[in-house]
Image (cartoon, rainbow, N blue to C red):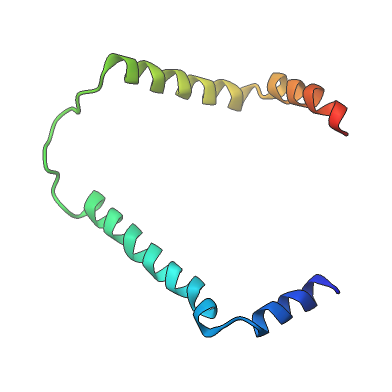
Amino acid sequence: MPPSESRKSSIASASSGERWARPRNAVVALFYYLLVAKRMYIEAPERTGRVPVAATLALSVALCALGVVVLGLYPKAVVLAALRVASPLF
């Protein structure tokens, strides 16, 4: 059976509760993210000033950011290593 026919049959056999699950979830997600955006941009902050961060957390974030930048600029080494490791699988 072609994928389009199986999709049609699954849609036709879906109950009304399943049929409304995606739109309902989209509305709930939209409501949640609009609340987050409102909290970020419209409401006044609870406190102003710098947020205290432990030195280990700051170091971890800095190392992760450095890794993202380095891998973004020079991905060749990681890609070649991944290909070398995955080559026995194919």
The mark total stands at: 0
Q: What percent of the width, then of the height, locates residue 39?
A: 22, 53
Occupied quadrant, residue 87: top right
Relative vertical location of residue 64 with respect to residue 2 in this rendering, above or below: above
Q: Tell me which residue sits at (29%, 55%) in the image.
A: 37
Q: Tell me which residue sits at (33%, 65%) in the image.
A: 31
Relative vertical location of residue 38 with respect to residue 51 in this rendering, above or below: below
Nearer to the camera, 89 or 79? 89
Q: Is residue 78 left or right of residue 70?
A: right
Q: Tell me which residue sits at (33%, 19%) in the image.
A: 58
Occupied quadrant, residue 15: bottom right
Q: In this view, does 88 lie to the left or right of 80?
A: right
Q: Tell me which residue sits at (79%, 78%) in the image.
A: 5
Q: What percent of the width, then of the height, locates residue 85?
A: 78, 23
Q: What percent of the width, then of the height, locates residue 43?
A: 16, 53
Quadrant of the frame with the C terminus: top right
Relative vertical location of residue 10 with respect to residue 74 in this rendering, above or below: below
Q: In this view, does 83 lie to the left or right of 10?
A: right
Relative vertical location of residue 47 with respect to residue 44 in this rendering, above or below: above
Q: What percent of the width, then of the height, locates residue 13?
A: 65, 83
Quadrant of the frame with the N terminus: bottom right
